[in-house]
Image (cartoon, helix red, strand yellow):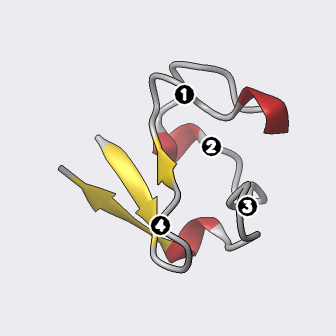
Amino acid sequence: MKYRCTICGYIYDPEVGDPDNGVDPGTGFDDVPDDWVCPLCGASKDDFEPID
């Protein structure tokens, strides 16, 4: 499942991860560190919602 930032619309895709910010590909959203922030706008994990 992918997750969308409700602030800027960035999509977190677990298959891709966010390697530029220390999140390896294949990392599920629940396993992303709590202090990770949206790479586009800096929003917290709490500002993401699951999308189909």
Which residue is denoted by mark 4 in the rendering? Answer: 9
In the rendering, which numbered label is found on residue 37?
3
Q: Earlier in the sequence, mark 1 or mark 4?
A: 4
- Residue at position x 46%, y 31% from top? 14
Which residue is denoted by mark 1 in the rendering? Answer: 27
The CA span between labels 4 and 2 is 18 Å
The CA span between labels 3 and 2 is 10 Å
Find numbered disc 1 in the image and state the secondary structure of the residue it sits on: loop
- Asked where in the image residue 13 lies, by quadrant, the reply is top left
Q: Earlier in the sequence, mark 4 or mark 3?
A: 4
The CA span between labels 4 and 3 is 13 Å
Q: Earlier in the sequence, mark 1 or mark 3?
A: 1
Q: Earlier in the sequence, mark 4 or mark 2?
A: 4
Which residue is denoted by mark 2 in the rendering? Answer: 32
Residue farthest bottom in this picture: 7
Where residue 26 appears, as percent x and y from the top left, is 51, 19
Find numbered disc 2 in the image and state the secondary structure of the residue it sits on: loop
- Amino acid type at image mark 3: Val
- Amino acid type at image mark 2: Val
Picture layout, residue 16 above or below residue 7: above
